[in-house]
């Protein structure tokens, strides 16, 4: 057994009983999640898989999808057009905050908040709703390396209760930040949030970004490598709701969380890491996930600005079976 695998098992044991946080309930379907679900998964850029706990439990991806939709929007429209409709500034707002548009440009602040994500998703190429959805699903399949499904109950649940998101879309329509067919844009956004994944899937998607956009197992390019830097920069500054600064300080790697309890993070050039536990804090981040990432970052010197340890410690732990 590798040292990394041993440490993941240890982290699972240490945190699986941590009961802080609550299961998200504002989307009725999310309430059905089992608060005990907990998984930790690591996939290296050469496709080796490590994990502990419920890494094959399916759940809806929710906000973590925003990372990948941003990449697809960049590929669809190019950087300049996308940046006309959405900025790259952190907001410090919680996940469910009402929209704040930039006072001068009227753009939503960044693609990782709901308003920005609705604007980004509306930029995905396609001749109509079905073709846009197909493009979105093929994009997820390139990252995952397998077929992808939308959870219809969650999609319908959010579609019928997502009034706040509808209000944001109307305001953005007023300021010409989104095209006139806002119902189609919202449907696509709700579908994107309802894509089913597992914790191991998230780690694989993260590993793809860590590997310059090339899926580690299929070796297919999931996203144009020119845009990986764009995606990781926005994740680093805006990916963890209004805990993004604290995360950058303590964990120090680009990440994104979602209200269903997933967190994925990228160790550039090395690996993708994901956690899943539906108990989230008031910011919308998984409580156990944060603890696990803080420990992993500390133990393996993963923080991007941690120059003392060097990330070879992490690589060694994926290979070595000896204690060091
Ligand atoms: N579909 C959710 C919403 O729009 C995503 C929220 C999240 O995970 O932050 O409210």
Image: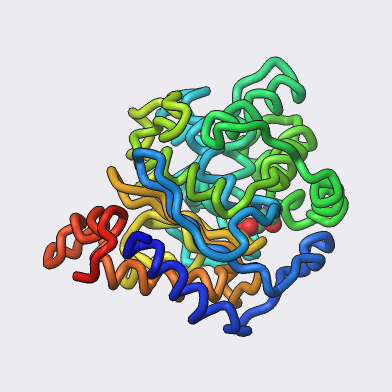
Residue at the outermost top position = 127
Ligand 1, what quadrant?
bottom right
How far across and how far down the image is residue 295, in percent? Answer: 36, 74
Q: Nearer the viewer, residue 34 or 178?
A: 34
Question: The C terminus is located in which quarter?
Answer: bottom left
Please give left or right for residue 49 compared with residue 296 in the image. right
Q: Residue at x 76, y 23 (%)?
A: 130
Task: Identify the image quadrant of the N terminus.
Answer: bottom left
**In which quadrant of the rendered view does residue 140 lie?**
top right
Q: Residue 114: give x, y in percent of width and height.
A: 62, 52
Instruction: Give the percent coordinates (x, y) of residue 220.
Output: 45, 24
Residue at 49% x, 44% y: name it: 204
Depth check: 211 or 72 in front? 211
Residue at image x 53%, y 49%?
A: 202
Residue 38 visible in the current orientation: yes
Count the marks: how many? 0
- Let me know if residue 234 appears in the view: no
At 38% from the left and 32% from the top, the residue drawn is: 227
């Amino acid at each position: 057994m590798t040292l990394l695998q041993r440490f993941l098992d240890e982290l699972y044991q240490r945190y699986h009983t941590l009961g802080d946080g609550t299961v998200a309930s504002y989307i009725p379907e999310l309430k059905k999640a089992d608060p005990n679900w907990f998984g930790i998964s690591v996939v290296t850029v050469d496709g080796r898989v490590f994990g502990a706990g419920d890494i094959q439990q399916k759940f809806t991806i929710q906000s973590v999808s925003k990372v990948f939709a941003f990449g697809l929007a960049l590929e669809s429209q190019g950087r300049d057009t996308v940046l006309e409709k959405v900025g790259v500034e952190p907001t410090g707002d919680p996940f469910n905050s009402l929209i704040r548009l930039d006072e001068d440009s009227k753009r939503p602040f960044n693609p990782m908040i709901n308003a920005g994500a609705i604007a980004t998703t509306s930029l995905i190429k396609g001749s109509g709703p079905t073709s846009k959805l197909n493009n979105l699903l093929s994009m997820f399949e390139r990252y995952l390396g397998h077929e992808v499904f939308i959870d219809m109950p969650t999609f319908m649940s959010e579609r019928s209760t997502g009034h706040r998101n509808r209000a944001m879309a109307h305001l953005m329509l007023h300021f010409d930040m989104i095209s006139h067919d806002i119902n189609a844009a919202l449907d696509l956004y709700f579908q994107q949030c309802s894509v089913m994944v597992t914790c191991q899937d998230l780690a694989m998607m993260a590993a793809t970004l860590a590997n310059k956009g090339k899926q580690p197992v299929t070796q297919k390019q999931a996203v144009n490598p020119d845009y990986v830097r764009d995606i990781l920069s926005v994740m680093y500054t805006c990916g963890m709701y209004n805990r993004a600064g604290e995360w950058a300080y303590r964990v120090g790697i680009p990440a994104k969380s979602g209200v269903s309890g997933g967190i994925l993070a990228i160790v550039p050039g090395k690996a993708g890491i994901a956690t899943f536990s539906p108990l989230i804090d008031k910011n919308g981040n998984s409580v156990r996930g944060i603890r696990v990432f803080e420990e992993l970052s500390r133990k393996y010197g993963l923080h991007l600005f941690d120059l003392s340890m060097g990330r070879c410690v992490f690589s060694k732990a994926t290979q070595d079976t000896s204690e060091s």
